[in-house]
Amino acid sequence: MEKKRFRIADSGLNRKKGRVMVSGIKLENFNENPVMLFNHKRGEVIGYWEDITKENDEMYGSPVFASTPEAQRIKQLVDDGAIRAVSMGIDPIELSDDPKDILPGQQFMSIMHSELMEISFTDIPAYASAVRVYSADGGEQDIPKLNPNKMDISKFNTALGLAENASEADALAAIEALTADKSKDTLSAIATKFSLEQVSEESISSLLMGAAGSAAEEFAVSLGLEKTATEEEVNAKIETFKALESKNTELEQKLQGYNAQVTSLLEKSQQYNAEKAKETTEQKEEGPKTLTYSDKLLKRVMQFTN
């Protein structure tokens, strides 16, 4: 008789707006004890799993039911199609809020690496691609929500001529390098210093021909040249200055735009953190709540685990 195969997990977005990367699920320890539970309840072992495989960013496995009355009861329900849902329990190892790891509509950080703890059959899964997230003490834990105001550095990297996945340190280094290119003596400053309406080929020729030797030498030095620089060398340096000034003007405009965006994002992030802090304080002040049976049932169905 051919064994039934069940899809245990995939890397897509679940109904809770979270995500678990199948490629990062560790199986080594689980394969030593591939326990199968019912509704994630410890002490209610109903069998084990075998042939756990990862295929096309999905994980599959085949259940083997124990011979106990409870296990056989669940097996019959599975064989009859009355129970069809499978849910895994994992221990998260690494989380990510990097934009490249986030899908459209996602609200919680992606679980990039995790360890598989158990796989359960369940009667009412809380959401598609259901998963129970264990804490270090064996209880449950919540995955942190994404900060909607987190800056997407890839846009800055592109504007700076870097790869989209360049690090923040690379971006800062690129900005510092561009800023360092700015000249101490701009063309307009030089023109003012030597009483020129503008720095042009004509004004330079006039200055060099009519000025005293010391003045011409000072002008050449102000451009970063030797005192004995020729007119051609001075003109070439001026063209370099012009190109640099144009580049600096463009850079300053970009930096002004970036600063405005960063300021806006920081304000939104501070507002977000303040709201979260207020929410946490209010929850502590309210203290534990007494849940009715219907409250408990609703919480059971809607919580992040099954």
Image (tube, rainbow, N blue to C red):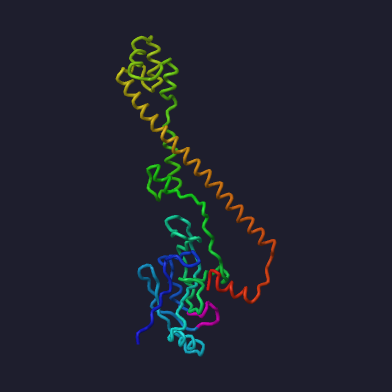
Q: Residue at x 40, y 72 (%)?
A: 59
Question: Overall secondary structure of the magenta stretch?
Answer: loop
Residue 127 position (above or below residue 279):
below
Residue 245 position (above or below residue 89):
above
Please tell me which residue lies in front, 170 or 59: 59
Q: Position of residue 208 (x, y in %)?
A: 35, 13
Residue 13 position (above or below residue 200):
below
Q: Residue at x 50, y 72 (%)?
A: 89
| Residue 51 among magenta residues | no
Total numbered circles: 0
The residue stretch that appears in magenta: 36-45
Outermost residue, left side? 232
The quadrant holding residue 2 is: bottom left
Q: Position of residue 132 (x, y in %)?
A: 51, 71
| Residue 37 among magenta residues | yes
Please tell me which residue lies in front, 171 or 242: 242
Q: Position of residue 36 (x, y in %)?
A: 48, 80
Outermost residue, front side? 294
The quadrant holding residue 25 is: bottom left
Q: Position of residue 303 (x, y in %)?
A: 56, 70
Q: Quick one: quadrant of the N terminus?
A: bottom left
In the displayed structure, does residue 295 sit left or right of residue 164?
A: right
Residue 191 position (above or below residue 144):
above
In the displayed structure, does residue 160 sit left or right of residue 133?
A: left
Q: Residue at x 50, y 51 (%)?
A: 150
Q: Residue at x 45, y 47 (%)?
A: 168
